[in-house]
Image (cartoon, helix red, strand yellow):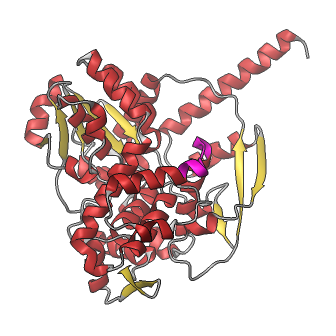
Amino acid sequence: MSVSVKKVFVGLLSIVALFLVGLLTTTHVGQDRKMIAGLLKQTSIITTEVRLTHINRLKLFTNTSSGVTGYHEQVIVPTPTLTMAQILEARTTVVKEVCAREFNNSVKTRGRGPIFFYSKTARMTCCKAPKTGSSFWGTVVLAIESQQNSDKTFHINRNSVHGRNEIAVPTFKNVSRNALSVMVSRDPYTRLYSAFVDKYFLLGQLGRSLQSALKKGPFRMNGGVCGYDVTFSDFLNHVTDLALKGVELNEHYMPVVKLCDPCNLHYDVYSRQESLTKDTKYVLELLKFSEAKKQDIQTSLKRGLKNTIYSLVSSYLSDYKKYRTDCPDRVSHFEKVWKTLQVQGYVSTKNDYPRREFQKMLTFDPDVITLLIIKEIERFPLGKEEKMLQRQSAVSIAYQDVGQATIQKVQKVFKMDFLLFGYDMTPPDKRPGAVTLS
């Protein structure tokens, strides 16, 4: 093939790719999306079988399934480089179109109204929507407003971010005229699973309440009790039944459309949890505040794993102090925390729980535990793609046990979140490349 013919061929492929990307950002999640996905797959696909010996450890309740076989698809398509401005403009366009078309046809859930993290210094707001990554923005706002080194700000219990630098809708409407407004979304399937792991698999009032409502017993492990015998399906049915009955929902599983009201409130940036790092970098560049402080925050974010693990561990410890009667054995509790960190993609499934190290601890200090976890992470470090695959596998494995009737309720209740923010309604275990247990 001559050089000139090659150039024409590549040019044509780029035009096709641009056309398909444009369609993906504006079409309804449904038959059109499936058609486009099929066209993309016809371009060039490499499919490899994946056999992950340790991935079955991602199953929170291990009373079923023994092996694992999956397929990981890599779709190679000549795609153009889109700027962040173009990506954000496309997201805004979709939100406006879906609000105009679908808002009055969706389930109206009840719960708290919008709350926002607000930085007066940087003139920036971010809607507070639990389990999307907005709490991370709460920490960024805290770092901007703080006089201390950003490392110290990020090295805190994540629960301590809440209730600080927050404003309600009336103030938001006043300040947003001269402030950059941000909201963060997340795939509803993944967000619901994250809420379940954090609030029901581990210890807390929500898990305790659901256990009581369903008349379930405690979760049994290591010859004792630790947590609540509540399954992910139990949780999903509980949430969707409350929503469809018009009962007020807890903010951790309330649809983001209700928490942030994007159909009535204007946002400059529609960020996604799935691209939070890239989106955050872009937003920080837009904000006008001290370059020294901006650089300080960027530096802290680059070395953020230790701070992230510390933040999680310290919050889990504070929850344990409140609800330790539900799990008298701290070692068992941190075994569940260990599995949680694997589900979240921080700790490799190759890492066995270091039970003996936890048994030796006289006091459970967050710094000591963080160093132990970091040491184990460094034994089997996960690359970016491996982390993503491990997280995706955990979610697809969890949904493998969820019935179709329950999935349909999730799709109905969270319809606007799927459509507004461009998420696929196909359940995670049914998506191409899903890793599931056999």
Q: Quadrant of the N terminus?
A: top right
Residue 17: tell me if it is visible: yes
- Tally of numbered discs: 0
Residue range (magenta): 377-385
Q: Nearer the viewer, residue 418 or 344?
A: 344
In the rendered view, tell whether residue 420 sits above or below residue 361: above
Q: Residue at x 48, y 56 (%)?
A: 344
Say which residue appears at 70% left-offset and 64% top-offset: 53
**Above or below, 297 relative to 350:** above
Say which quarter of the image contains residue 91.
top left
Residue 381 falls within the magenta-colored stretch: yes
Q: Residue furthest top?
A: 4
Identity of the residue drawn at 38% across and 46% down: 308
- Is 380 magenta? The answer is yes
Which quarter of the figure has residue 5? Answer: top right
Rendered location of residue 393, percent (x, y): 59, 59
Q: Is residue 236 visible?
A: no
Residue 369: image x %, image y %? 39, 57
Image position of 212 (left or right of 353): left
Q: Position of residue 164 (x, y in %)?
A: 14, 44
The front one of 389 and 10 is: 389
Residue 118 rendering spot, x and y as whole percentages: 17, 35
For image coordinates 34% across by 37% down, the residue present is: 96
Quarter of the view holding residue 68: bottom right
The residue closer to the viewer here, 272 or 64, is: 64
Nearer to us in this view, 133 or 333:
333
